[in-house]
Image (cartoon, rainbow, N blue to C red):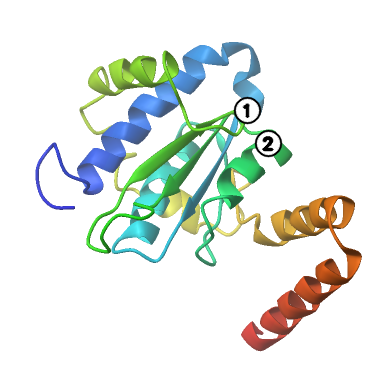
Amino acid sequence: MGSGFALMNELTVIQATQGLIRHIQKTFKDKVKSLSVVIGFDARHQSHQFARLAASLFAHEQINVYLFDSTTVPTPFIPFSVQKLKCQAGIMVTASHNPKEDNGYKVYWENGAQIISPIDAQIADSIQANLEPWKGKAWNLDIIKQKNSNLVSDPIEKVFILVLIFLKINFNFRFVISIYLIYQNYVIFLN
């Protein structure tokens, strides 16, 4: 992380997001009214801010955003959510196993997998074509601060229930109940 075009910072997050948006709009032009993405972040420096910057750009482009805004989430929540919420893409702001000073921007496609060739090259081309921050949209977080916005929502409870259902179907029922009780205690603690 740091200043410059080769490092992770607010400008490069905006540029990457603008390119990703244009690529999604081009690729899924027949679904333009129902486009959606999911965005999460971890506890690294500026992860939450980077996630919010990305989310606001999608919302400004009338793309529905499931933003895990209330808490950090583990990386697997994003590909799981992409599939279960039927999103076209997902972003996880994390540098995974790299040093704590680093950060990163992982992109998942509609199948829940991280992007690979040729999609990665197509998105890179789209980023290069969208380097200028969009006036009135880049750095404008007002759209995600609006409580009545239909474009941005926090899916944490919905995804947690989907995870429980997945675990119940595929694993031990007692294990699922234990996780649910832990979650309920966590929710009560927060309220």
Residue 100 rendering spot, x and y as whole percentages: 27, 64
Residue 33 rendering spot, x and y as whole percentages: 64, 24
The three-letter amino acid code for the residue at tag 2 is Gln
Is residue 24 rendered to the left or right of residue 46?
right
Residue 66 can be seen in this image: no
Labels 1 and 2: the sequence-earlier one: 2
In this view, 183 is above or below 126: below
Q: Which structural element holds mark 2? A: helix
Indicate which disc residue 111 carries.
Answer: 1
Distance CA(mark 1)–CA(mark 2): 6 Å
The single residue placed furthest to the left in the displayed view is: 4
Residue 150 rendering spot, x and y as whole percentages: 63, 46
Residue 92 can be seen in this image: yes
Indicate which disc residue 128 carries.
Answer: none
Residue on which the image places disc 2: 83
Q: Neighbour class for label 1 at 10 Å: few (<14), some, many (≥20)?
A: some
Residue 127 rendering spot, x and y as whole percentages: 29, 24
The single residue placed furthest to the front in the displayed view is: 172
Kindly identify the residue that appears in the image at 63 percent across and 12 percent down.
Answer: 30
The three-letter amino acid code for the residue at tag 1 is Asn
In this view, 161 is above or below 186: above
Q: Which structural element holds mark 1? A: loop
Kindly identify the residue that appears in the image at 62 percent across and 83 percent down.
Answer: 190
Kindly identify the residue that appears in the image at 23 percent across and 39 percent down.
Answer: 12
